[in-house]
Amino acid sequence: MKNFQVNKYGYFTEDGKEFVITTPKTPAPWMNYIWNGRWAGLVSHTGGGYSFYLTPRDNRLTRYRYNCLPWDQPGRYIYVRDKKIANYFSLSWAPTIELKYDYYECRHGLGYTKIITENLGIRGEVTYFVPRDYDIEIWLVKLKNLTNERRDLDIFAYIELIMGNALNDLINQPNDKHFPDVYFDGDLKSIVATRRYWVTNRGVSVAQPNHAWPYYLIFSTSLEIKGFDGDKEKFIGRWRSNANPEAVELGSCFNTEITAGDPCAVIQSELELEEGEEKEFVFFMFLVDKPSLHTNERLKRNSKAYNKASEILNKFKNLGFVHQKFDELKKYWDDYLKTLQVKTPDEKLNLFVNVWNRYQIAVTFDMSRNAGYYHGGLLFGTGIRDQMQDIFGELIANPKRVRDRILEVCSYQFKDGSMLHNFFRISRTGEKTGHCDTPLWLPFGIITYLKETADFNLLYEKVEYYDGGSGTVLQHLIKAIEYSLNNLGKHGLLKFGRGDWNDTLDYVGVKGKGETVWGSEFLAYILREVIELFNYLGLKQFLKKYSEEYLKIANNINRFCWDGKWYIRGFKDDGKPFGSSKNREGKIFANPQAWAVISGIADEERTKMCLKSVEKYLDTPKGPKILHPPFTKVDPSIGLATRCVPGKKENGAIFNHVASWVFLAELIAGNAERAYQIYHATLPLNNAIDADLYKMEPYVYSEYVTSPDHPSFGEASHSWLTGSSDWFFKSVVEYMLGVRPTYAGLLIDPCIPSSWKSFSVNRLFRGVEYRIEVLNPDGVNKGVKEIWVDGKKYGDRILPVFKKGSICEVKVIMGKI
């Protein structure tokens, strides 16, 4: 693929692995993640963003100011000052945005961001990344003299620190500022920063564990250090900002150390560049453990922490070692992507499925809905529902990580089968909200993992319950289902509680009587999947019961919830239906139509009718809406959805997560052309052509796009951390291209546009590389006539599982059967 220009702001490189932004003045900060599963940072195209370790609330390292414009401030800033003329600029454009730059370019890659600028006759390049095997953040810098005279430069590297609880920093900063300790260690030639008091239970209570932040943060460089600052107020100066720090303007840091105040870490170095000369150096920050949570001591020479810091400093001041780590990072992502590659006639689909869709899923696997510009990382922690959906892409490349995640999620289940809705990893606290769908996502994740790996030993591993005692993973799975089956209402449907997948339907069941159709379809889906699993394993104890329960729920939905042309959304506490043709607003919701098909509870006739209703009432040029018509009046019996402005969020937006389910339902129903239309209608590449309207990054899915029910139709919001990336990926690979994992092997069942004459899928499955070529000579949407495996005709649509490390050549011929 040649460089693919998306809009006036940027393009994809030929290999698709970088998105290049050619002007800093994008409609919003376009960002990326640098992370390794433990250390993480958000980096915008102008160097903005923050870093954290393990969790963005309790272990925030650098500060992020909420409600800023633009909303990516502050960041990782490197100022370059010419000594002779006393002028300066930032290598990332921000925060010195009022200056005229001669050149700007940002390259967002897989796990790294590179920003290139030219100003004052200096070409600067900074690459931000986090190695896979070291918890350290690296800023690799190149400076080149573009003039014909020698240049004497001052270099200032700046970060603003929190070192602890970000929520406490936001709401209690005047008191929290009494505890930072920032100083320069002359032996380590580094800034060392820590905090004497660490808040981990930031709620309305003032009661806190009495301990220190358990780390020393080290900030250093490969250059010789001329000066430093730990006091932000002194470095910036009075009545100034990051755009014009007093120390930079004067050309000299103040060498401040603080034991209270607003902490920062600034390193000043000098650099000489001859005519045309280029030099490379590095800034980096990392953590070392304190010896105790109860110590307020500074880093002691020859201590374990000191020696560890010294070891890391020696390694990363070596530019050869830094380049090695960067090369290893790029190789990691190359290997990650190689585990699944598709080649279809659609280059946009190839680009997304092979690279950016996959990469976004990797981000959501680690960030959940927690650490982003739109998910502040302060209140909700990590969601169970999100964790068990964000596994599809990771599962192919790193099944062990998914296995560990499932065991972790099991540990947040109570003995009765209920679960925390969300949790915080360090404190292991969370909230039990009463969402009816939360317990069911655990069996969903387990089943998804088992179909990919056939690692049935997982079922017999013991995991503690959140409220004490322990059980096998199989017992955890059964408890989740039993809890749900014991939570049915008047119509034999799952009770709503404080919400289902749609959190904003939070008052439908607040009195304990409301029932959810989508949640009941999801329960039916889980029952059907568990029946298949137990059949495969010969676990007969629950088979009869769950088969009967599935039929009961399916019958109840079809008996009580069919509205004539679609399924209603549910029953409120007063027993009245909503999402019905009888309602004036919110007549039809997409969720119950899609999941009626996905769960298998709708027969062929009702499948056609409910999907046609979605197309008729919910369709827009940018994908199906979540509901129609939107609510214009507050309905206290429904909840927050009715308070959202019409056309945005859950009140009638094009909610991409929901759109992905409609896409999947159309594929299951065999409607390839309709599904393909939905895919392209929702594809960020297409919607971001008008970037000034769309605003969000064109290389990842956003949570929603504003619908025609609002004047800003086409504007997107809440990019990156959305389950739509996972579900579009899963639906394309498993149901459109039709390469789907089962317990017995890979099932081949494509559902493609009739114009496609061929496509291929290379996929790693249980250690075997499957090279699958699909031919469609008759131009059909669906139907497999022949399968050839390693040159021999094969009589089954489920491919055999070969020995690990082997390669399986598969040819599939589609046609009318």
Image (tube, rainbow, N blue to C red):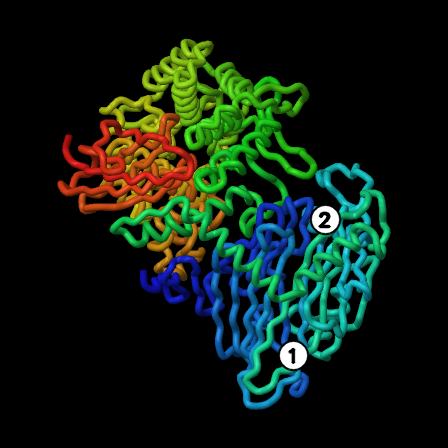
Residue at left 65%, top 65%?
Answer: 318
> Where's the C terminus, which quadrant?
top left
Vertical side of 62 occupied by 776: above or below? above
Point out the tag, 2 or 1, that comes first from the N-terminus. Answer: 1
In which image quadrant can residue 605 be found? top left
Vertical side of 133 occupied by 501: above or below? above
Residue at left 32%, top 53%?
Answer: 348
Q: Marks 1 and 2: in contact by CB < 8 Å?
A: no
The x and y percentages for residue 549 are: 41, 13
Frontmost residue, 31 versus 144: 144
Vertical side of 85 occupied by 793: above or below? above
Q: Is residue 576 left or right of residue 156?
A: left
Label 2: state its secondary structure: strand
Specify few, some or many for label 1: CA neighbours under 10 Å numbering under 14, 14-19, or 20 or more. many
Q: Which amino acid does label 1 sit on?
A: Arg
The residue most toward the bottom is: 149
Labelled disc at residue 81: 1
Frontmost residue, 793 versus 240: 793
Specify few, some or many for label 2: CA neighbours under 10 Å numbering under 14, 14-19, or 20 or more. many
Q: Is residue 453 visible?
A: yes
The x and y percentages for residue 562 are: 31, 22
Q: Which amino acid does label 2 sit on?
A: Gly
Residue at left 61%, top 27%?
Answer: 411
Frontmost residue, 452 versus 440: 452
In which image quadrant can residue 557 be found? top left
Frontmost residue, 89 versus 224: 224
> Where's the N terminus, which quadrant?
bottom left
The x and y percentages for residue 76 are: 62, 63
- Distance in Å between CA atoms under marks 2 and 1: 32 Å
Q: Name the residue under label 2.
A: 164
Q: Can residue 659 be seen in this view?
A: no
